[in-house]
Structures are given as structure tokens and as C-alpha cells.
Amino acid sequence: MEATRRNNLRIQQSFLSRAFDTFNIAFIGLCSIATILPFLYVVAASFATEREIVERPMFIIPRDISLAAYKYIFSSNMLIKAFGNSVFITVAGTVINMMFTVTLAYALSKKALAGRNIMLNLVIFSMFFSGGMIPSYIVVRSLGLIDTYWSVLLPGAISAYNMMIIKNFFQNLPDGLEESAKLDGCTDIGALLHVVIPLSMPVIATFSLFYAVGHWNSYFQAMLYMSKSPNKWPLQVTLRQLILLSSAMAADPGSYTSDYMKPPDQSVKMAVIVVSTVPILCVYPFLQKYFAKGVMIGALKG
């Protein structure tokens, strides 16, 4: 009798487990479809004609393939220059971000550091309060950084939130590793470079990706600080100007001549999203193995 009851209980638990797994798979599958479908539509619409975009509210495969939007976008030589500017700002900005973030996080992870609590409180204060746009602009202008690449690289050199997570990760590393390195003659900088950073590659790779995505997608700072230097504009600002020009020309037929092809307004917007998104998406596969581990590992302990 007891054996029968246990078997029935085991069967019931097995059924509930399978039902829960089925529900999870179905729910995650629906969420994945809801996430992927809009992007597939954007890609398809960028190759579609204006008429098809208006007539069909949703489609994955366009009836007629048109490259008019991409021809319009790449018709300007400024796009190549803007792409180079974005790559430079993303790479240089990420290097600066990680250099300052890692060194500050490493210093604040040492409990023996004089004034550590005061510095931590100042960092936490900056997470909730900021000077605002106008004071930031005045500071950048007074430093002579207007219309230079430094205006978009230095003001956001450290993210307080990212720095705190990396600090927690450093704080949880065994102290014996650094002590052994120092017994072998390493300085604090040497221990950081040869012991701490190699052990911290998952978290460093993850936050490097966060910083890189932020720089790649950023456009407001460039508009604000480099408004008089269009040759230094990143890709996002240049694409924004192309969208504004396309919309203006589509709204005013007299603004273009027969020698100039009328820009496809809606498909240009879709093509701009694809052009600005695909390059940074290509970086994810190379950092995917570090991503989940890096996000969780620095937040396990405080």
C-alpha cells in the first residue's frame, strides 16, 4: 500500500514537472518570437518598396526586392567617414571606460584604503544625482573640448553602476592570490595586471560590451558637443540627418529634381535601423560565452 502511494506520488510529481517544463518552453518560445519578429520585419521592410510597406502592415518576406533605401543611404561619402568615426569612438571610448573603471574598482575593493568609505559614498551619490545637461555643457566648453572627440569620450568615462559591480567581483577574489604575487615581487599594479585581470575576463568582457554598445548607439552627446564639426559625427548622427533629409524631400516634392532619385521615406528608416544595428550585433557571438557568467558573477556578493 505504501509502495503504491509512493509510486502515485512520483508519477504525479513527474507529470507536474513535465507540465512546468512545457509551460516554460512555450512561454520562452512566445517571448522569443515576439522579440525576433519585429526585427525581421524591419529587415524585410528595408528591402521592400514604399507601396508594400503601406499596404502590408506586417510581412517577413517582401514581394519585390528593392535596394533603393540602401542606395540612398550609401550614396553619400559621409557615411563611410561616419562609420569610421563610430568605430574609433566605440573602441577608444571602451578602452578609456574600462581603464578608469577597473582601476577605480580595484582601488575601492581594498578595505585598507584610506578614505575608502568617503569615496564610495561619493560614487553612490553620483548614481542618483547629476549636474544636468547645461552644467555638463559648460564644463566641457570650459575645458576646451567642444568639437573634439574628447567631448564624447571623457564626460562618461566611468559608469558608477558598472564600477560597483566590478568592485564587488574584485572584492570576492581570494586575497592569497595577490599576496603570493607580491611575495614574488609584484607591485599592486603588477598584481592587477598579471593576477586580477586574467581572472576577471568574464566580467571585463561583459562590461566592455555594455560600454561599447552605449558608445555605438550614442548620438545626443555628439549632436550637443560636435554640432559644428560634421566630419567628426558618428554613424548615428549622420543616419539621423539622412532620415531628416529623406522626410523633408518626401514631404516637399519641389525639393528634389528629376536628376535626383526621390528617397523612399519609410524604407530608409528601416534601412537605417539595420545599418546601425547589425555591426554591433556581430560583436555578441564573440563575447556570448562571457556574457551570462559576467553579469551574474559580480552581483553574487556585496
Image (cartoon, rainbow, N blue to C red):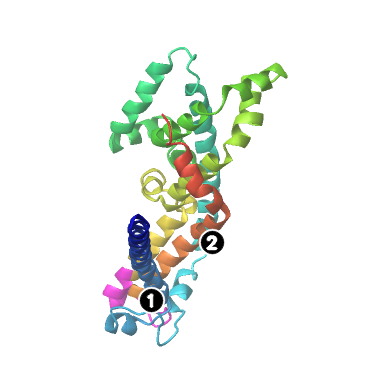
**Whether residue 239 is visible:** yes
Q: Is residue 258 magenta?
A: yes
The secondary element bearing badge 1 is classed as: helix
Quarter holding the N terminus is bottom left
Q: Is residue 125 left or right of residue 66?
A: left
Q: Cα distance, mark 1 to mark 2? A: 23 Å
Numbered badge on residue 80? 2
Q: Position of residue 262 (x, y in %)?
A: 37, 78
Stretch of the chain drawn in magenta: 247-264
The answer to whether 137 appears left or right of 93 in the picture is: left
Residue 54 forms part of the magenta stretch: no
The numbered mark at residue 65 is none
Up the image or down, 137 lies above or below 182; here it is: below
Q: Callout 1: few (<14), some (14-19), or many (20+) C-alpha neighbours within 10 Å?
A: many
Residue position marked by numbered label 1 in the rendering:
45
**How far from the left and from the top, in percent, is residue 141?**
39, 34
Name the residue rendered at 33%, 32% in the picture. 127
- Tell me: residue 226, above or below residue 192: below
Identify which residue, 262 or 111, lies in the foreground.
Answer: 111
Residue at (39%, 30%) from the top-left corner? 142
- Residue 123, given in percent of the width and then of the height, sits at 38, 26
Query: What's under tag 2, amino acid-wise?
Result: Ile
Count of residue discs:
2
